Amino acid sequence: MGSEIVLTAGGDLISSEVESFKDEILENLAQKPQRLILDMGKVKVIDSSGIGMLIAAKNSASKYKCELVLKDMNADIIKMFKIMRLTEHFVFAN
Amino acid sequence: MLSQDDKILERFLAESREHLASVENDLLELEQQGDDIDYELVNCIFRTIHAVKGGAFFFGLEKLGDLSRHLEVILDRIRRGELTLTADVIAILLSGSEQLNLMLDNIDNLDSFNISDIDRSIEELLFVTFSEEEKLESSSFIDIKFPDGKKIFTVNKYDFLRAAETEKGGANVYLLSYDLIQDLEQKNKTPWEVISELLQICVFIDSKVDIDSIGTLDSDLPTSIPFYVLISTVIEQHLLCDLISIDARSVFHVRKDGIIENLSYENKSELVESIMDYFLTGSPSVNAQTGNKSLRLSEESLEYLKRHTAILKQLGQMLKSNCNCSNRDLIIKLNAEIGGIFSELSGVVRVNQSADTGQAREGSIQDGATERMSLIVFKNGSVLLALPLLLIERLEKIGAGKLQAAADGLLSYNGKKIELISSSEICEDAVLEDGAEYIVAVLRGQRRNYGIIFNSIFTISNTSTPIYSVEPVKANIVGTVVLDGCMVRLLDLHRLIMPTPVEQMSVTASAGADVKCVLLLDNSNLFLGYIKGILQKYGLIVYLAKNRQEVYETLEEYGDDVGLILCGLNFPEKNILSFIQSLKDKKLYPDIRIIALTMLVGEEKKFLRLDKNKLISGYIPKMDFYNIVNECYTPVTEV
């Protein structure tokens, strides 16, 4: 059981890609880390499914009492999250 | 996709710096003016700050936007005469302007800016100007909720009520209810695309994703993600639905007390039923000659229906499915305004030319504002037509006869049948045929208004050089209409091309014989259309621009050819002075003459300022153009 796990999103979080990343997150949450860091450095585009998956991941993490951190998120995506008032639900890190 | 904004961001930053450079001087000038305030100068500064604010929020630079917004409010109070322009106020504005400049140079590091001091000063300053009611509003909150008590937002009351007063905001506050999966993903749209659309036409009051409705990763990924947006806009509901491609059922009007009017499609059938009952059983008037039945709705009903377009949609569908009418036995009489709302109605609309709406229509044409007048909508082959009174009057004046839409989806003109081809069959290569008659009309598209032109009034002499130019910009061709076998292209709305005699055009004299290309800059589409048509008659090549970006792009490509810029004094949106100055400063196009177009009323000072700096070659009153058009609107060949 690690206290911190880092997962890297391999590319854009779009509907055709989110399923595999979701499984990866779920597997790692099962290890009950205190903090799960999603490295979003390679994510340039995020669609509705991607947003839904991240929110579901955040909900899952809360269930496991794990802090979900979005790392190196693209500034434009953060901008979109701000407008959608999603930033208040996530922790961001650089 | 998102990174494509970088260029626009850079441009925004450059323009903002440029604008703010003049603000400091303008503020100092205001200070020197003492009690004799130049309100036009205050307006200039206001527009500059407003532009910075708009861009800042668009690009997610919230701190920059927040400060701009506060400064904007101060300036707004000054120009309304609600706040005295003291040295303290000037000092705060100068300090704010300086902060904005610093922020523009450090947009990657906005979080490091501490603007709490200036924010506090501004709030204190504004609070003094607040009425007791506003003071109460500023410290209280309002729930935005459905009548059943379901709360969607809690927002600051002052912000909520004042959002409607901003430029893009308006009297209409709506709750938009999206489903990120159903409404966006399944239509191949990203959230950012939707947000970008909204940001251009409205003020965001608040938004939220209903994250509680989304489960965890243990279950399947969500098939529904509710996303609520609270907006304020001048745009009315039926147009909003088209502009942002949202179903009318997902748009809710929010009253000033925060109650969301739940007028969804389904639960208003009772009202529609009652209207139907009235129509079908309640003695509609019958035209003795044609047998047409007609229903005249009361003013009260019209007002109600204007606000609740979902009902109109339902009404239209029920009319079509229940009335079992033949081609000409069902006509709903509406005035032009309400007719415009029947965008989804697959039935018949005949314009009711009641005198009470004439004035308003004329006004809207004069100022070139959104001319949501007239439209033809065709869905599945059906037709809807409503022309503005002014246009109808002109058509009739020149003997154009009556326009009529029939229930079977055909538009008739003086007994001639007009078929409308669906958008999937758009033919961009369509040409006007020799000797064919065309009629002026407007098309309302799914996402925006398109329009004009069947030229039924005019006889086209030949296909290559029609008497009245109907040469569209290709990108603006949105459809093709067949009129008695002649194909007519539908052009962008407002590209009204009016015939005008050469002698009365003073603009070309100003331009000089050497001018071959003209760039028109104005914030009025209708006006641009007029002038373009006029200039094209001279064989001039005319480019149009409605914002700075279009100007820069056009000049980049055609700058060497452009000999004259005709520039509305209100163009570009904000600070015309700095814009023209920047063109001159850059010495990019030293030989281009600039002529200002002005309404003159209230713009004299601005013109004098421009003239004093010898920035422009002269000016032309816009009314001259209108008069020319009005006086000379005569057909070459009467029908």
Image: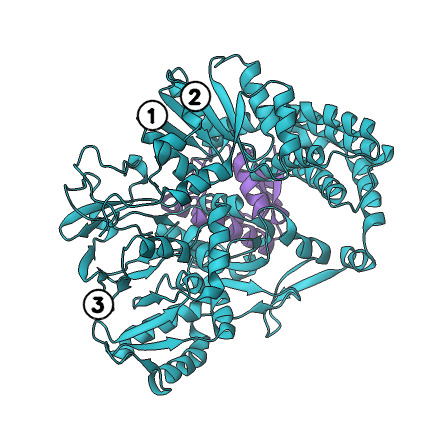
Chain colours: A purple, B cyan
**Residue B369 in view, yes or no:** no
Picture quarter with the N terminus of chain B: top left
B357 or B451, nearer to the observer: B357
Is circle 3 on the same chain as circle 2?
A: yes
Q: Which residue is mark 2?
A: B511
Q: Distance of mark 2 from mark 1, alpha carbons? A: 11 Å
Picture coordinates of residue B64 (x, y %)? Answer: 67, 35
Amino acid beneath label 2: Ala
Work out whether B607 lies above or below B148. Answer: above
Picture coordinates of residue B192 (x, y %)? Answer: 48, 43
Q: Earlier in the sequence, mark 1 or mark 3?
A: 3
Q: Earlier in the sequence, mark 3 or mark 2?
A: 3
**Residue B518 in view, yes or no:** yes
Work out whether A65 lies above or below A91. Answer: below
Contact between labelled residues 3 and 1, with CB atoms less than 8 Å apart: no
Q: Distance of mark 1 from mark 3, alpha carbons? A: 43 Å
- How many numbered marks, from 0 up? 3
Q: Which residue is mark 3?
A: B408
Name the subunit of mark 3. Answer: B
Picture coordinates of residue B556 (x, y %)? Answer: 42, 19
Is circle 2 on the same chain as circle 1?
A: yes
- Tag on residue B540? 1
